[in-house]
Amino acid sequence: MNEQTIGIIGGLGIMGRAFTQLFQEDNLQVLCSDINTELTNQELVRQSDIIIISVPIDQTIPVIQEIGEALTEKQLLMDFTSIKTEPIEAMLQTKADVIGMHPMFSPPMDSLTNQTIVLTPIRDRRGWLSLVLDYFQKKGFKLQITSPERHDEIMGLIQVLIHFNLMTLGITLSRLEIDLSEALEYTSPTFQIELDLIGRIFTQSSELYGTIPMRNPFTRQILEQHTKTLDTLREIILKKDSESFKELFEKTSDYFQPFKTKALAESSYLFSQLVEFNGKQ
Amino acid sequence: MNEQTIGIIGGLGIMGRAFTQLFQEDNLQVLCSDINTELTNQELVRQSDIIIISVPIDQTIPVIQEIGEALTEKQLLMDFTSIKTEPIEAMLQTKADVIGMHPMFSPPMDSLTNQTIVLTPIRDRRGWLSLVLDYFQKKGFKLQITSPERHDEIMGLIQVLIHFNLMTLGITLSRLEIDLSEALEYTSPTFQIELDLIGRIFTQSSELYGTIPMRNPFTRQILEQHTKTLDTLREIILKKDSESFKELFEKTSDYFQPFKTKALAESSYLFSQLVEFNGKQ
């Protein structure tokens, strides 16, 4: 992408800054527009070959509509939105080539490399995809290519189910008025890691964590199965129905079978790293 | 504890073996009895100064009753049970001194040191506690002393709420028939860690994970609050009620305020360690 100018709309946000820095380290030409920049979105579009939209989810489609007329078929339009079906549809209304993108991480992070980026290439008359793949692969990212619909279905698990679950835990702890500092004195590694993940979510923007599940087309179906499962498990435990518990546990255990060795090795490694981190504090 | 003989009932189990090894590294005298050992529990009690019961939760009270008559006031009786109120009551029926114990980890682990052990000393006419504290502190363990009731209340969070939540997630994933290997290709660090913790639970015994919540006296109260919270959050998301979501999120965010810096630093560290671990595979 050495000869291209990359314009990031929303370039002063957390993701915008992280990718600006990444591109600048490689001496790529980067332009940024944001709410308070002198450069307008329209001007950025005129001066860029690749335009990346890095704005809050609810702003993505309005921004696409705002710049839509100015885009030409010589340009590549990308976005960082955590939902892909809707933004891709909007981007296809422009004349530009379109590759949706979803970086599966949120800064601050010690390193961006080795992290996963999902790409949903949709219209690529000029062969942008190989340029993009080549650049990010060289930077050490793990790249996944899929359709916008399949992306949203898998994110239904990763971003809806998992985050919903962690948020529920966090809200429950706050409602039970637990003294976190006391509870942490008694911590198990699992509890400590869960609190870290919950605490991390609640340092971030409510906008992000609310909009993703509200916009993902698979949310209702996933949350309904989750609630049904939770009700079943709760009843089994409250009734002290050891037989049903054992049956359900062993069935799930079978499902995790292919993943068990990795889960055990990886969690044991994380536990020991946690101990090391605590030792450093 | 150098001059004492330590007898571990259930010494061939996972915890029994881990502590036998620990004690033997220090050349302490250790005896083990288990279902298939020649040494019986009664014989072990006759030959030991400190008796540690390391058996499944539902076996703890029967074992205490079995050896109760044989114990004298010169001996120290300990246990490793994850619930403390009930076993402590049973141990107090014997003549021995009583210090309940709960190691907050389950092998396999790279290292036992720096891990937390909770102690609930109840009857200590002979000053055993200082011996026990001294030994485990020198080994690098983190020791917490509390009452059996407070132990069970805090474990209601750490072992009931957190494990219940992870098991619910695991069962939901299996019911949605998710292809784990495909989902992992798209993973975020949070998803990967959650899967590791879930997978770790389901490699262990259904007996342990069923009996703890069924026996903990705070289970009903905690799970009721959890279900209420989950229903509230699900309704807010399905109704796309951004205002209520924001309010709930920010209230919880305030609750996590004192813990945020640590949560962010520790989770970022774990994420980078995960990347390193993946790189080694």
Image (cartoon, coloured by chain):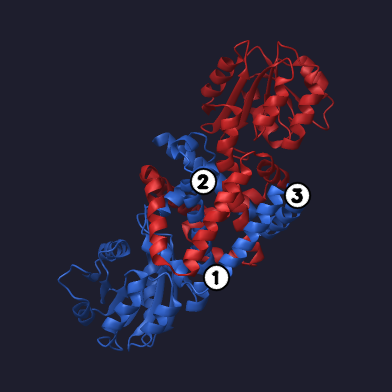
Chain colours: A red, B blue
Q: Amino acid at mark 3?
A: Asp
Asked if one can make out residue B22 in the rendered structure from this viewpoint, the answer is yes
The quadrant of the rendering that contains the C terminus of chain A is: bottom right
Instruction: Say which amino acid is labelled 2.
Output: Leu
Image position of B263 with respect to B216: above or below: above
* Crowd class of label 2 (few under 14; some 14 to 19; many from 20; radius 10 Å): many
Mark 1 lies on residue: B220
Q: For numbered disc 3, what is the local secondary structure?
A: loop
According to the image, label 2 marks what residue? B270
> Which residue is at a point 61% across and 31% down the rendered structure image?
A102
Residue A57 higher or lower than A248, as above or below = above
Residue B30, position as x, y percentages in the image: 23, 70
For numbered disc 2, what is the local secondary structure? helix
Question: Where does residue B47 sit, x and y in percent of width and height?
Answer: 20, 79
* Chain of the residue displaying label 2: B
What residue is shown with label 3?
B241
The residue under the point 71% across, 47% down is A206
- Circle 1 chain: B
